[in-house]
Amino acid sequence: MDELDFSADIAALRSTFADIRSVIGIERLQADIASLSEQAGAPDLWDDTEKAQKITSALSHRQSELARIDSIQLRLDDLEVMVELANSESDAEAAAEARAELVSIQKLLGDLEVQTLLNGEFDDHPAVITIRAGAGGVDASDFADMLFRMYVRWAEQHKFAVTIMDTSYAEEAGIKSATFEIDAPYAFGTLSVEAGTHRLVRMSPFNSAGKRQTSFAAVEVIPLIEAAGEIDIPEGDIRVDVFRSSGPGGQSVNTTDSAVRLTHIPTGTVVSMQNEKSQIQNRAAALRVLQSRLLLLQREQEAAQKKELAGVITASWGDQIRSYVLAPYQMVKDLRTEYEVNNPTDVFDGNLDGFINAGIKWRKSAKE
């Protein structure tokens, strides 16, 4: 067996890892964990349930991040030992394991390096995603449901918490819209590159003639902000409607007028919430999402004004960001980054990291 020499590869990984640790700020992360642990240990912690949940969630996120960093450090150390053992014993199987571990760590550090690019104002917030069926009739509703499942599967693969906030079912198949929260470190910064119009091309299962059908769905991604402080909405600017929840339910969900629809009268922004059993809880959750959307709208308007004052006239990329083609060939392609794969089934099963990482890098280079 030829002797393994990964010294240059491991040195490069250690250099990249040191840069990542510096950007993340390990000392600050450890200080945050210590502070949050102290707060989580307070005897009156659960007197305020909402505050307690925020503290414990933030603590869990930071502990997970630190554990991931520590795990990479251990794996780098173990890799050097694996190489030494493989060479000393001329063990082909051990050498193969060492090669596989090298590739795995390279991918892990590549993904972590992408995270260091997430330094926007709200990048570290949880994300609220809304998917709406667009043009294309029943196929569009079915496509919206496929995207809904895709993002939930992606979150599940990463062990991120998902909360379904509102679902509007289409009459024949699929959904008209769905809103859900993904609570994870840098969820908004990570998933914001998925916002835009997605296009599906396939042989329609709903068309008896078996013709090829093109359909569209819109994906909106906003940061979930704190309920107070960021933006104030006068009570007179909000219309509140209550109604009975629809779709699959149980207990009292579908038997009382617990669902809430908030309409922001000045902008026409509408938020519906039916996940909770209590009308009060649904209203509070809907208000948070409404605040988040209005804050994002405010930021977009400010950015547009700055561009106009600066004389920037170059149009930004259009809404259509990605094509999912199932016929006459198999391909998923991002139209901004040119990143593509030839296995749509794998993508719809939630394997999106390649697209997301490419999108984050593209966004960073577009700003430079």
Image (tube, grey):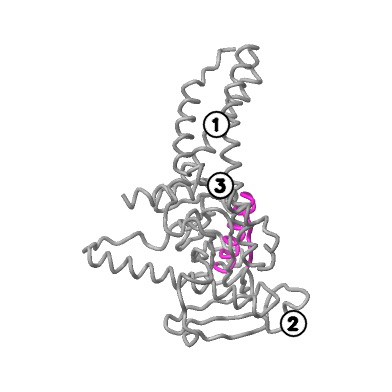
* Residue 96 screen position, x and y as percent: 62, 23
Mark linked to residue 255: 2
Helix, strand or loop at label 3? It is loop
Query: Which segment is the magenta one?
Result: 140-164
Q: Residues within 10 Å of mark 3 (few under 14, many from 20)?
A: some
Is residue 351 positioned above or below 49 on the image? above
Tag 3: amino acid:
Asn
CA distance separating discs 2 and 3: 43 Å
* Residue 15 screen position, x and y as percent: 45, 30
CA distance separating discs 1 and 2: 54 Å
Question: Which numbered disc flags the more N-terminal residue, 1 or 3?
Answer: 1
Identify the residue shown where x is 66% and y is 68%. Answer: 48
Q: Residues within 10 Å of mark 1 (few under 14, many from 20)?
A: few
Foreground disc of the pair 2, 3: 2
Question: Which numbered disc flags the more N-terminal residue, 2 or 3?
Answer: 2
* Residue 286 screen position, x and y as percent: 57, 75
Which residue position holds label 1?
A: 103
Which residue position holds label 3?
A: 343
Helix, strand or loop at label 1? It is helix
Q: Is residue 214 visible?
A: no
Identify the residue shown where x is 59% and y is 25%. Answer: 79
Foreground disc of the pair 1, 3: 1
